């Protein structure tokens, strides 16, 4: 089986983990946690980076600090991994779901602008959803597959209505818009280092912010809100979300390889786009001007998605469908969904992800392409 998206652990991972084991520094204290934060911060250009246990934890804490709480609303795209919505639920807030751009598969900014104009009112108490009087506390764009929407326009729209941006940039390490890194446009950004991401720490996530006070609060909350380590004094409800040293050690080794991994991902993207152009009814995700995507996971659209999915997996090419739209999940199907033509459902019915691991050989890639072409020729 040619795998879909597996880690590339070809660097100093063993050596750095062994240092943790040899010294006994395996938990949340240790040099690799700070080093990993520094290296990710330097790579992204973020003012501050706070390492935590996963991307969901990063989104959860970012919302708490942004003031999201019970009875509030957060705008999110209907097409995303479920962690986006779960993190909103953890705060006691609800999501308002917006449709997806049919070309880029990102949050549709035309729909967002119409929503602000038609459904919301800016008051002294904040941005109010007129239908129920609830406050919209944040807008959470998701950089789907490492692509990005027009962040300049999104920033302008949100500034106009005083709505802070919390970027779910968990798939977008290495992606930029007009030279600025994903996760650094809003009040907060986040990253994920799950096993299938562009680099991994097994689990792991990162919170980005350019505000020193917000960064200090994020670190405080993710370390159980401890103010006195000797007497174990905690001044509020905190979370045991801090990344541990042994996983951060893997992250440091992965950061040493990141530039090469991104280069390989871009080669894979170019290869597939070239070799699959004109095959069947395949259509590619559009990368708009100004976006330099990390090409994390190659995905395309076809009306024969389910047939192709079955065929590829049966013939040794691991593939998967896109996420189920959030409004089709039982716990979120009662949420408001603002759309014009329900592009989210269409995308879900047609999108398929194919092998994109950075350690695939050209022979692997050629096999994937040949298998897809055989399907359409049969």
Image (spheres, rainbow, N blue to C red):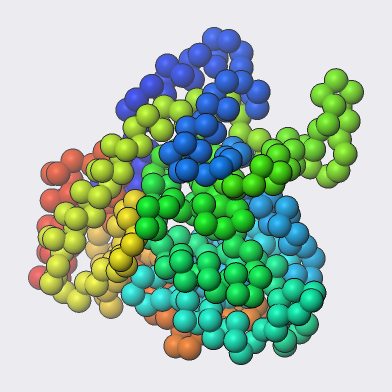
Front-most of residues 204 and 148? 148
Q: Residue at x 18, y 45 (%)?
A: 364
Front-most of residues 37 and 199? 37
Left or right: residue 22 versus residue 221 is left
Front-most of residues 181 and 281? 181
> What is the x, y in percent for residue 266?
25, 50
> What is the x, y in percent for residue 176?
39, 53
Tell which residue pokes out farthest to the left in this image.
Answer: 377
Left or right: residue 110 versus residue 336 is left
The image quadrant of residue 85 is: bottom right
Residue 292 seen by the camera: yes
Front-most of residues 130 and 333? 130
Q: Is residue 230 above or below residue 311?
A: above
Left or right: residue 314 versus residue 18 is left
Q: Residue at x 79, y 76 (%)?
A: 124
Q: Is residue 216 above or below residue 114?
A: above
> What is the x, y in percent for residue 253?
41, 27
The image quadrant of residue 315 is: bottom left
Residue 318 seen by the camera: no
Q: Residue at x 14, y 44 (%)?
A: 362
The image quadrant of residue 144 is: bottom left
Q: Residue at x 38, y 64 (%)?
A: 321
Q: Is residue 40 above or below residue 87?
A: above
Quadrant of the snapshot with the C terminus: bottom left
Task: Count how many numbered circles sit on residues in the image.
Answer: 0
């Amino acid at each position: 089986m040619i795998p879909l998206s597996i880690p590339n652990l070809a660097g100093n991972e063993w050596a750095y983990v062994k240092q943790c084991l040899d010294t006994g520094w395996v938990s949340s204290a240790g040099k690799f946690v700070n080093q990993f934060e520094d290296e990710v911060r330097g790579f992204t250009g973020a003012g501050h980076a706070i390492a935590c246990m996963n991307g969901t934890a990063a989104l959860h804490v970012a919302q708490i600090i942004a003031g999201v709480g019970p009875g509030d609303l957060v705008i999110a795209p209907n097409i995303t991994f479920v962690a986006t919505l779960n993190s909103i639920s953890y705060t006691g807030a609800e999501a308002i779901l917006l449709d997806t751009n049919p070309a880029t598969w990102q949050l549709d900014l035309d729909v967002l602008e119409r929503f602000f104009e038609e459904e919301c009112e800016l008051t002294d108490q904040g941005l109010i959803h007129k239908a129920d009087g609830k406050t919209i506390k944040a807008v959470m764009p998701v950089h789907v597959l490492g692509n990005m929407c027009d962040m300049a326009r999104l920033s302008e729209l949100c500034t106009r209505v005083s709505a802070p941006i919390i970027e779910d940039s968990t798939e977008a390490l290495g992606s930029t818009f007009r030279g600025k890194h994903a996760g650094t446009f809003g009040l907060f950004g986040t990253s994920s280092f799950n096993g299938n991401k562009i680099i991994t720490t097994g689990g792991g996530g990162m919170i980005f912010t350019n505000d020193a006070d917000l960064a200090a609060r994020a670190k405080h909350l993710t370390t159980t809100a401890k103010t006195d380590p000797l007497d174990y004094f905690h001044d509020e409800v905190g979370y045991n979300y801090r990344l541990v040293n042994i996983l951060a050690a893997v992250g440091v080794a992965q950061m040493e390889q990141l530039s090469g991994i991104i280069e390989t991902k871009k080669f894979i993207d170019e290869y597939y786009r070239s070799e699959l152009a004109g095959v069947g009814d395949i259509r590619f995700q559009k990368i708009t001007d100004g976006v330099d995507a990390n090409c994390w996971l190659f995905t395309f659209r076809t009306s024969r998605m389910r047939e192709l999915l079955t065929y590829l997996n049966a013939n040794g090419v691991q593939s998967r469908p896109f996420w189920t739209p959030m409004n089709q999940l039982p716990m979120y199907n009662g949420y408001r969904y603002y759309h014009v033509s329900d592009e989210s459902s269409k995308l879900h019915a047609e999108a398929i992800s194919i092998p994109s691991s950075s350690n695939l050989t050209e022979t692997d890639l050629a096999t994937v392409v040949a298998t897809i072409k055989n399907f359409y020729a049969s």
